[in-house]
Image (cartoon, rainbow, N blue to C red):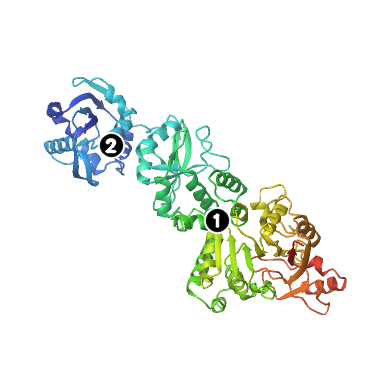
Amino acid sequence: MLAEIHLFIIWSNATDKLHDILDDIKLYMNIKRIYTIQWSKEKFSENLSRFYGQNLPNGSDKEIHCGTDEFICIIVEDIAPKYQTRVTSRGLELVNINMFDLKLKYRNWTGGGHKIHATNNILESEHDLSLLFGKHYDFFKNVTSDAVNFNNFNQDIVGANGWESIEKLFDYLNRFTKYIVMRNFECLFDEYTMAEHGDIDLLVENLDEVIYLTNAKKVFLEPYRVHYRIVIDGEEVLFDFRYVGDDYYDEKFARLLLQERVLDSKGFYRPNDRLYFVSLLYHALVHKPIFSQDYQQRLKVLANNINVNDVLLSYDPVLLLIDQMDEYQFKLVKPKDLSVYYNQSVVNKFVMYENLLEVCRTEDDYEKILLHDNRWLILKNLSPIRQNILNWYPFKKDSTLLEIGGGCGAITGLLCKRVQTVKVVELSKRRSTINFERNREYDNLEIIVGNLNDIKLDHKFDYVTLIGVLEYAGSFTKTKEPYKEFLKNIKSYLNEDGKLLLAIENRFGLKYFAGAKEDHTGKEFDSITGYVGNDTVRTFGKLELEHLLKSAGFESLKFYYPHPDYKMPFEMYSDDYLPSSEEMLMSAPNFDNERYELFSEPLAFKGIIENGQFPFFANSFFVECSIK
């Protein structure tokens, strides 16, 4: 093996044996340097704690045992190192037995205990030399040997009075501990932190190790807080030290982030791009009360860089997070740090999707479930009322059908019963899994996970269903006219006499005038005023929808009006059979949102119908679209 640099420390209470030890070392090692070191009295306990990486307060047993006066550091070269397993204070370790056995001998000479310190391996040697002298291992490897002269070194260990630069601090972190800068690292090292992000967030393998290494001081007294300050170039810089096992991320997630870390060109460790996307999405949704524009924009850029489909990021980021975590089998966990926000609405959605998957795997009687669980995500996916949108439609039995956006399969089972073959394209893997579980009895079903725009299907269909999907085309079709181009793409999959069956909200639906929030953006009057500032989701009025469909090549259109909307329809009207003014049409419920009720929708509909305006104000459209 190659020669190694190591060190012995003879603490002040053992210096009476100094010359005996020096004479003995010379028999086995080449002495490179001998230092007499004096730490300041006020910093001695802190230096000792940081050197050993353990809490050794003023007057600790170890401090009294070792002594607080000047001590001796002997730097040696072992020209023939040998490694074997030995029992150490940290358990079984592979150590340099030349150093280890000499340490035991000298401890015996000095009455036992720990008055003699020696390094067991190169990493420990590099750690100790760097902290004591601020010099790299290679510096001492290259110095000439001097076994005679004693060099005075009266300095506290590195970082005792702050770090000269952030680059110096991260050099030590890089060499002596496992960590990543979790996020907001784009500004390093030109700036310490980014705007609106006032600290540097680290994920570390060993919290105590990092605290002692960096000389970080706690900001808050609460034991669960991990907010620290470190002096850098005379300025206090704030850090958060998240650690493996603190449930900021689940343990598997945290360990993989550290295991797959990469060294940034600027000189610090960060997550690899793939895991950075997942961890930043998790943080932005689970640890924050709102999904801010700042994080949305950064995640969109990241998604494009790593070829992650960003469609779900626009209209259902929580579902995207569920899919990403499913891929790695990560879990949602509540942080032990009580100061970290834990978004209960996001948690609830996670739980509902878990419940939905479990129900579809184990239950057949969904109505029994709905008697006890009326959460909207459960209701809209399990209620048989969802099938009303298509259960009346006269499908040809020997036909083929493409269902775009099959979701959790609320309608898929009905389609499997009505046609010969069903192919589903769905963006979300979790939704596709639920769909598969609930409809596993059908052997005429195939489910594809992905964006239709990225998939090339090798045949055409008699029917294509587009139920609650067109409104999102702006988020997953990257063209100047996304809605038109998406419809043209769909048309290419239809047989010459095929039909597109489309359901979508009416942007001028009466419920929106009456105070219901827009279904996709959650804002009052958003569709009525034209979705100002939003180019990823939109619905259409009847005339707009007619023009759009015809511009995409659908020449024959037949409009229907599901009421109160297409999601949970109880009645289906058409231009051939419109409601009469004698019918009291029910108000549209908002199952997943609180809403205002500015006026009576049934009474308003009565006057609208009398004036022949029901198609304009209907809450939803169902359109049968033919190419010719």
Of mark 2 and mark 1, the one earlier in the sequence is 2
Name the one closer to the observer, 293 or 216. 293
The residue pinned by badge 1 equals 320
Spot occupied by residue 94 in the image (x, y as percentages of width and height)? 22, 42
Q: Secondary structure at mark 1?
A: helix
Name the one closer to the observer, 248 or 591. 591
Spot occupied by residue 521 in the image (x, y as percentages of width and height)? 67, 57
Spot occupied by residue 228 in the image (x, y as percentages of width and height)? 44, 43
For mark 2, does the 10 Å Cα neighbourhood hold few (<14), some (14 to 19), or many (20 or more) residues? some
Do labels 2 and 1 touch, CB within 8 Å?
A: no
Is residue 153 visible in the rendered image? The answer is: no
Q: Which amino acid does the dot numbered 2 rest on?
A: Glu
Residue 178, picture quadrant: top left
Is residue 523 visible in the rendered image? The answer is: yes
Q: Residue at x 21, y 37 (%)?
A: 66
Across the whole image, how many numbered discs are drawn on residues?
A: 2
Does residue 38 appear to the left or right of 438 in the view shown? Answer: left
Name the one closer to the observer, 358 or 296. 358
The residue pinned by badge 2 equals 124
Residue 541, picture quadrant: bottom right
Does residue 71 appear to the left or right of 442 in the view shown? Answer: left
Q: CA distance from mark 2 to mark 1?
A: 44 Å
Q: Which amino acid does the dot numbered 1 rest on?
A: Leu
Q: Secondary structure at mark 2?
A: helix
For mark 1, does the 10 Å Cα neighbourhood hold few (<14), some (14 to 19), or many (20 or more) residues? many
Does residue 244 appear to the left or right of 482 in the view shown? Answer: left
